[in-house]
Image (cartoon, rainbow, N blue to C red):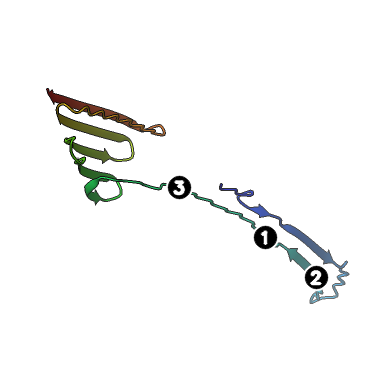
């Protein structure tokens, strides 16, 4: 929340008083001139600037992971971000389930976001393995988000 009042409140009051007395000039050669001038200048110019800036940022992002995760994050400038995630999940017998997930996220500038998700699941019968993957990507305009997901499931009965 950012609240800014005005950007500036400025009040300037200037009062000038110039008083000139009446001059009487009497010339009796060679000429004598007398002038009296009284000037009073009063200036009151206070300037008041009030800026209220209140910022509140609340971020809640807990992560819970029961997998083995290897992550490499390389950031060049504040504009380019690359994330590589490799996860291997191996359940205990009598089921053998191996899930390999390779994710590459490349962001160029704050405008383009590309996500590639490739998953391969191999299950050896007679067990049944069910994998449900739900991905939610929310992008606030004017960004463009592209998601490509390739899944291969091979079951040997």
Q: Is residue 17 above or below residue 108?
A: below
> Which of the two discs, 2 and 1, sits closer to the camera?
1
Q: Earlier in the sequence, mark 2 or mark 1?
A: 2
Q: Which element type, helix, strand or loop, lies under badge 3?
A: loop
Query: Residue 75 placed where, x, y %?
Result: 25, 50
Tell me, for residue 37, which label it has, or none: 2
Judge from the rendering whether residue 100 lies leftward or rightward of residue 22; answer left or right.
left
The image shows a total of numbered marks equal to 3
Work out how far the residue at label 3 is from the one at label 1, CA to CA, in angstroms: 43 Å
Identify the residue at image location x=49%, y=49%.
58
Circle 2 crowding by C-alpha within 10 Å: few under 14, some 14–19, many from 20: few
For disc 3, the marked residue is: 60
Point out which mark residue 145 bears. none
- Ranked by sequence position, the earlier of labels 3 and 1 is 1
Q: Residues within 10 Å of mark 3 (few under 14, many from 20)?
A: few
The residue that label 1 is drawn on is 47
Q: Pointer 2 and pointer 1: residues touching (CB < 8 Å)?
A: no
């Amino acid at each position: 929340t950012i609240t800014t009042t005005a950007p500036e409140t400025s009040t300037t009051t200037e009062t000038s008083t110039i008083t000139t007395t009446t001059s009487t000039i009497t010339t009796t050669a060679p000429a004598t001139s007398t002038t009296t001038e009284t000037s009073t200048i009063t200036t009151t110019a206070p300037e008041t600037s009030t800026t209220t800036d209140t910022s509140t940022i609340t971020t809640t992002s807990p992560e819970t992971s029961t997998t083995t995760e290897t992550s490499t994050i390389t950031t060049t400038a504040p504009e380019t971000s690359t994330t590589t995630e490799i996860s291997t999940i191996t359940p205990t017998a009598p089921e053998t389930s191996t899930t390999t997930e390779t994710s590459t996220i490349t962001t160029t500038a704050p405008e383009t976001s590309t996500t590639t998700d490739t998953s391969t699941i191999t299950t050896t019968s007679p067990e049944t393995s069910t994998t449900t993957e739900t991905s939610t990507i929310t992008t606030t305009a004017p960004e463009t988000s592209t998601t490509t997901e390739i899944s291969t499931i091979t079951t040997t009965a």
